């Protein structure tokens, strides 16, 4: 997987288009002059969290004795569930939470941007090829930058595109992510099977 493929995967997982409605809903009670500052802060916190999981996720896996095959299968399942929620969102969107006052870390930074699927994807990429960490970091920065631009322009995009167009784009992204999730799940199960056969 090259840097652009990894960036596209992370972009689909972060799902900035699908996050526009919940972001606007959560920031509705924040003063207009504070919204961009709050959003920029949450985006930076999310980036720091994802970089932390990129570089230190392998130690978590080692401590928990989780194999790469198990992580791949689990990542595929998580991505599949996220994709289903993108294709068939609830009445308030794929993932939204009521917040009183100004949000801090939860739910904008975590889990709407730095969610479990993004964390698992980064750990899986690093577990597959740790020596290529510059590639994975570059992919993360590309995906985060594109997502940040979309979310910083959320109000304008919501007016320009309209609710139906945003929903259609999110469902298309969900369909693409479903295919990626199934591929990850199959690869994880296949790798676990090969390891089991070699161990016999």
Image (tube, rainbow, N blue to C red):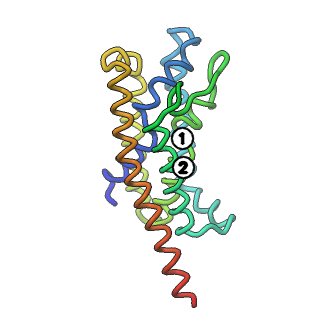
Residue 150 image point, x, y percent? 38, 28
10 Å crowding of disc 2: few (<14), some (14-19), many (20+)? many
The quadrant of the image that shows the N terminus is bottom left
On residue 114, which mark appears? Answer: 1
Residue 137 image point, x, y percent? 43, 51
The residue at the point 41 percent across, 62 percent down is 132
Residue 33 image point, x, y percent? 50, 9
Q: Residue furthest bottom?
A: 200
Residue 130 image point, x, y percent? 47, 65
Give SS at disc 2.
helix
Q: Nearer the viewer, residue 156 or 52?
A: 156
Q: Disc count in the image?
A: 2
Q: Is residue 181 depicted above or below 154 in this figure?
A: below
The residue at the point 40 percent across, 61 percent down is 183
Q: Nearer the viewer, residue 195 or 46?
A: 195
In the picture, residue 105 is in which quadrant?
A: top right
Determine contact: label 2, label 1, CB under 8 Å: yes
On residue 123, which mark appears? Answer: none
Residue 110 is left or right of residue 121, and the answer is right
The residue at the point 49 percent across, 33 percent down is 89
Q: Nearer the viewer, residue 119 or 98?
A: 98
Q: How far is mark 2 from mark 1, CA to CA?
A: 7 Å
Give SS at disc 1.
loop
On residue 119, which mark appears? Answer: 2
10 Å crowding of disc 1: few (<14), some (14-19), many (20+)? many
The residue at the point 55 percent across, 9 percent down is 31
2 or 1: tag closer to the N-terminus: 1
The quadrant of the image that shows the C terminus is bottom right
Residue 145 is left or right of residue 118, and the answer is left
């Amino acid at each position: 997987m090259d840097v652009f493929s990894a960036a596209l995967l992370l972009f689909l997982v972060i799902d900035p288009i699908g996050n526009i409605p919940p972001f606007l809903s959560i920031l509705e009670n924040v003063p207009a002059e504070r919204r961009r500052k709050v959003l920029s802060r949450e985006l930076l916190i999310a980036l720091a969290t994802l970089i932390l999981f990129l570089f230190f996720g392998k130690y978590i896996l080692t401590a928990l004795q989780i194999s790469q095959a198990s992580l791949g299968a689990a990542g595929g399942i998580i991505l599949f569930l996220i994709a289903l929620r993108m294709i068939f969102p609830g009445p308030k969107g794929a993932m939204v939470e009521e917040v009183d006052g100004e949000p801090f870390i939860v739910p904008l930074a975590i889990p709407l941007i730095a969610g479990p699927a993004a964390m698992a994807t980064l750990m899986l990429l690093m577990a597959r090829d740790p020596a290529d960490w510059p590639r994975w970091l570059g992919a993360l920065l590309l995906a985060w930058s594109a997502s940040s631009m979309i979310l910083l322009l959320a109000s304008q995009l919501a007016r320009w595109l309209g609710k139906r167009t945003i929903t259609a784009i999110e469902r298309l992204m969900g369909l693409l992510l479903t295919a990626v999730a199934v591929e990850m799940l199959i690869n994880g199960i296949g790798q676990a099977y090969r390891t089991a056969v070699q161990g016999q």
